[in-house]
Image (cartoon, rainbow, N blue to C red):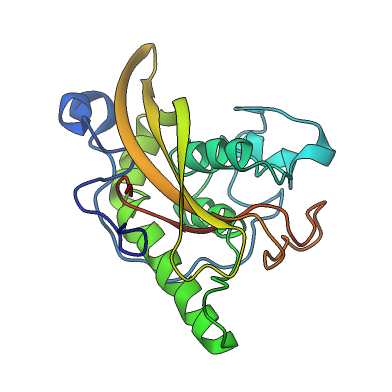
């Protein structure tokens, strides 16, 4: 099982971009960015205040207000299926007219927890920064294309389609697994929509070592993201 190595060839929310260039001015290719900073506040990054996306009771998600930016809120749960569905959707659900790219990356960064397979704190921090770098390079579109989509008022939403496959992670001290599923990406540009299908994976920790998001209803042991992969990781 190749669960500890990113796959090749996926570009999240990019598959099928060739047929969407006019509508979306191309979507997601690798770009370089450092580690996102802190979670954006309600006053940062938004140009509209209209909620967009799934809604949940405040007690069931880390921050329900993020829907105003067109983002998926992180669920507070120990149910792997529920969490993986939300995480895979969150990685490719964005509306550049409602937030900056940096703030979107910062939002996704709050889903992360350290890799508990690393016993040294410094090693855990280095691994997290590496995984966040992968997120920026392989998952989120570069700044120029974000700006182009913003100018054209284009957006992308993602939804898991069908069952999730869970596989074990080598050297796991407990609670870690990789969830893989088919995801439907819906591109919207005005009244024009198009859909594409990708199969992607996310590594999650639902166990004692997970670190909750600060100032949130989460508790240690609730599900958190360890890393996103740039393709499906399966046995």
Q: Residue at x 36, y 53 (%)?
A: 229
Question: In this orientation, does residue 32 appear?
Answer: yes
Q: Residue 72 placed where, x, y %?
A: 59, 38
Q: How many marks?
A: 0
Point out the image quarter for the N terminus: bottom left
Relative vertical location of residue 16 with respect to residue 225 in this rendering, above or below: above
Question: In this orientation, does residue 47 appear?
Answer: no
Q: Residue at x 52, y 80 (%)?
A: 118
Relative vertical location of residue 45 with respect to residue 6 in this rendering, above or below: above
Q: Residue 110 placed where, x, y %?
A: 62, 58
The foreground one among 95 and 127 is 127
The foreground one among 34 and 57 is 57
Q: Residue at x 38, y 22 (%)?
A: 188
Horizontal side of residue 39 vs 138, given as left or right = right
Q: Residue at x 74, y 41 (%)?
A: 61
Q: Residue 122 placed where, x, y %?
A: 54, 88
Q: Quadrant of residue 197?
A: top left
The foreground one among 69 and 118 is 118
Q: Residue furthest left?
A: 18
Relative vertical location of residue 223 with respect to residue 87 in this rendering, above or below: below
Q: Residue 135 placed where, x, y %?
A: 40, 58
Q: Quadrant of residue 15?
A: top left
Horizontal side of residue 43 vs 176, given as left or right = right
Q: Quadrant of residue 66?
A: top right
């Amino acid at each position: 099982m190749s669960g500890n190595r990113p796959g090749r060839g996926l570009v999240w929310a990019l598959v099928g971009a060739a047929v969407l260039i006019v509508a979306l001015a191309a979507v997601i290719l690798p770009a370089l960015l450092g580690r996102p900073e802190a979670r954006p506040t309600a006053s940062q990054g938004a140009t509209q205040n209209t909620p967009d996306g799934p809604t949940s009771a405040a007690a069931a998600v880390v921050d329900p207000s993020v829907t105003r930016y067109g983002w998926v809120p992180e669920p507070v749960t120990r149910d792997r299926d529920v969490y993986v569905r939300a995480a895979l959707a969150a990685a490719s659900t964005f509306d550049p007219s409602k937030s900056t790219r940096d703030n979107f990356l910062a939002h996704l960064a709050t889903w992360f927890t350290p890799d508990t397979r690393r016993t040294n704190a410094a090693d855990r921090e280095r691994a997290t920064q590496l995984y966040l770098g992968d997120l920026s390079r392989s998952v989120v579109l570069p700044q120029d294309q974000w700006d182009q989509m913003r100018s054209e008022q284009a957006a992308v939403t993602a939804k898991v389609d069908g069952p999730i496959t869970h596989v074990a992670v080598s050297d796991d001290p407990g609670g870690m697994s990789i969830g893989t599923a088919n995801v439907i990406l819906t591109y919207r540009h005005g009244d024009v929509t198009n859909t594409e299908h990708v199969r992607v994976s996310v590594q999650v920790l639902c166990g004692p070592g997970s670190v909750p998001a600060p100032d949130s209803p989460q508790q240690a042991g609730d599900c958190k993201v360890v890393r996103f992969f740039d393709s499906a990781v399966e046995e």
